[in-house]
Image (cartoon, grey):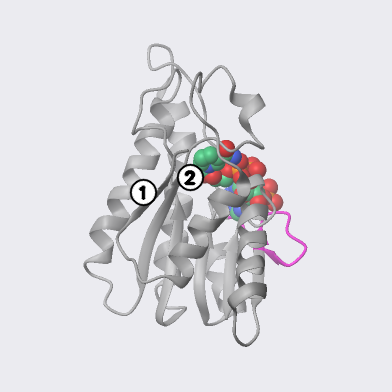
């Protein structure tokens, strides 16, 4: 199994890599080859805001069985004050980056393979400063639902996590009373998407 994880060095990405490795150690057959990519990666360098860079990444990795994206930084800003640039930064940094990965991945995923994108709880519930993320997360979920109907040879899902325990202290004021989840639990949702049968699903990890 060859799996490309874009964003493998991030808080969520590291947990996804761990979960895939743990699953393989317990249940996997054959070899597991996880290819990690990001801007500062020691394996595959890519800037997902750049078409050429993404194309070059996929030319280098060739055919894989699964592509997982755990990238994207969001701007938190009140809709009563945020300017268009704030929304554009979040759209570029998360929605368009992941869409760019998904579109490029279509020709590099083996028959029956999968693409897994990352959205999030923001947008499904209302959070202070969450409107930029809301647009992006709901947009990614909508893309996956629609695209799955037209992808005949591959599966595509989003994983939609709530805040991770590993990130909770930084977002304590944003998620008051919301249950955080461990990176291991979030990581298992990616295992479900990669190894399972589902397509067009928003796999919610909301505690
Ligand atoms: N952490 C949470 O609690 C949580 C909860 C729900 C949803 N999410 C979502 O999960 C995703 C990841 O969050 P995170 O907390 O893991 O963030 P993070 O720790 O900042 O990790 C982001 C990862 O993406 C890579 N990256 C960022 N921009 C990139 C670009 N333009 N091209 C290529 N790689 C890029 C980073 O590596 P480089 O810097 O080397 O490029 C890093 O590996 C985000 O979409 C976030 O909204 C996170």
The residue positioned 61% from the left and 66% from the top of the image is 20
Q: Which mark is residue 65?
A: none
The answer as to whether callout 2 falls within 8 Å of ligand 1 is yes
Magenta residue check for 23: no
Q: Position of residue 148 (x, y in %)?
A: 27, 65
The residue positioned 60% from the left and 79% from the top of the image is 28
Q: Is residue 142 above or below residue 176?
A: below
Q: Residues within 10 Å of mark 1 (few under 14, many from 20)?
A: many
Marks 1 and 2: in contact by CB < 8 Å? yes
Residue lying at the far front of the rendered structure? 26
Q: Which mark is residue 94?
A: 2
Q: Quadrant of residue 80?
A: top left
In the image, taking residue 207 as reference, residue 43 lies left or right, namely right
Which residue is disc 1 drawn over? 140
State the extent of the magenta-drawn residues as a range.
37-47
Q: Nearer the viewer, residue 44 or 176?
A: 176
Q: Quadrant of residue 4?
A: bottom right
């Amino acid at each position: 199994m060859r799996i490309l994880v874009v964003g493998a060095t991030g808080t969520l990405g590291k947990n996804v890599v761990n979960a895939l490795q743990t699953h393989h150690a317990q249940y996997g057959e054959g070899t597991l080859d996880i290819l990690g990519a990001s801007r500062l990666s020691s394996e595959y360098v890519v800037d997902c805001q750049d078409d050429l860079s993404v194309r070059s990444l996929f030319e280098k990795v060739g055919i894989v069985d699964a592509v997982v994206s755990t990238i994207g930084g969001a701007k938190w800003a009140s809709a009563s004050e945020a300017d268009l640039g704030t929304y554009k930064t979040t759209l570029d940094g998360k929605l368009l980056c992941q869409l760019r990965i998904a579109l490029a991945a279509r020709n590099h995923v083996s028959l029956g393979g999968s693409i897994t994108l990352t959205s999030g709880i923001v947008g499904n519930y209302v959070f202070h400063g969450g409107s930029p993320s809301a647009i992006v997360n709901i947009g990614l979920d909508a893309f996956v639902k629609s695209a799955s109907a037209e992808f005949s040879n591959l599966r595509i899902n989003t994983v939609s996590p709530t805040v991770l325990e590993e990130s909770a202290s930084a977002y304590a004021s944003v998620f008051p009373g919301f249950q955080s989840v461990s990176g291991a639990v979030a990581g298992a949702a990616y295992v479900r998407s990669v190894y399972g049968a589902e397509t067009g699903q928003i796999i919610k990890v909301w505690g």
